[in-house]
Image (spheres, helix red, strand yellow):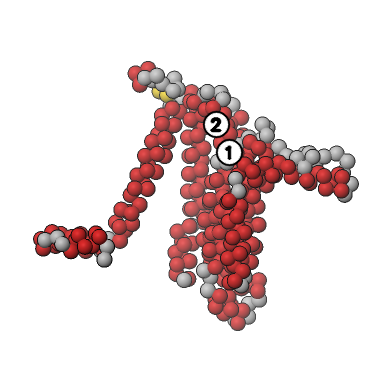
Amino acid sequence: MSIIQSVINRLPGEQMGYVDGVNRYLRDRPNLIALLQLSLGLFLVFVVLGVSLLIVVFYSFVRPVPPESLTDVSVTLEHYQLGFVETTFYLRVMWDSFVIAVQTTILCILLAYPAAYFIAFSDLEYKNIWLLLIIIPFWINLVIRTYAWMLILGNRGLINWLLIDLAGFVQDPIPLLFSQGAIVVGLTHVFLPFILIPIFTSLDRIDRSHVEAAKNLGANKLQAFYEVTLPQSLPGVAAGVMIVFVLSFGSFLTPILLGGAENIMIANLVEEMFGQINNWGLGSALAVVFVIVVLAIVYAFNRLIGLKELYSQEGEAQ
């Protein structure tokens, strides 16, 4: 018996009735219990992230930034005008970031789904080993992994060494590093586990008897996969797509190291405004527009794909 339970048992009869009433009230409202359990975490999220975001929004609409006092503040739209009306540079960087995020997400799907399928349908004794190999990259520092790609993609890196010195296919180094392609490769390496694990979870939950039933009804392996396996794995695919896309869209370190100065992404631009150029107003405007764009894309994806329907279908199938 726990200490709390022993204390409750020693309460007078009237107070014990209050305790029983509260217990009955909570049992009839399971969502309230979950909300109470999440309340501390939600409070910290709203305070830390919410207040910070409100400050950024405030800075994007005022002048000067940062203000010395609230009495000297004047409302203005010049930061948005400078960033998105008078020039197309920032919009072009936003678009390039979007394209890189989409390419990274597509490449992650192409690499993750076959691997997740292989692991999910492999023997149980080897499944934990494959999962361990997926998790191992998390143990290695991100900077180290990114520098490893610099050694592979550089002009004197592994790939050019194989093509020039070993195979003799080319005479001059191929410029692989400091390009959008290098960023996509680096981001794919970083975020591949974030999509592989959700897909594996969905595939691993599929009842194998459904696949066998489809085959017994005349479907070949490809038809059984298309009609049974793929639809039931879509929730994991959708979840992984959103995680990888959002993280790739706002990536900061990998574009700096692998993309160079000519292939920066929107997060690098915002950091430059705050840390180097000291233009906090424009940096805040860029950050606000970026958040709005991400939320709009997530909302459109949810409306288009129907995440709620996907997960409800998965629950019904189980």
Residue at far top of view: 72
Residue sitting nearer the eye, 257 or 1: 1
Compared to 163, does 311 lie above or below? below
Q: How busy is the neighbourhood of tag 2: few (under 14 within 10 Å), some, or many (20 plus)?
A: some
* Secondary structure found at label 2: helix
Image quadrant where residue 33 sits = bottom left
Compared to 176, does 34 lie above or below? below
Amino acid at dot 1: Phe
Q: Are marks 1 and 2 in contact (CB under 8 Å)?
A: yes
Point 37% across, 48% down: residue: 41
Residue 147 percent across, percent down from the top left: 67, 41
Residue 189 percent across, percent down from the top left: 64, 50
Amino acid at dot 2: Glu
**Residue 105 seen:** no
Residue 82 percent across, percent down from the top left: 53, 24
Residue 252 — which label?
A: 1
* Secondary structure found at label 1: loop
Compared to 282, does 165 lie above or below? below
Point 23% across, 62% down: residue: 5
Residue 178 — which label?
A: none
The residue identified by callout 2 is: 271
Point 71% across, 41% down: residue: 150
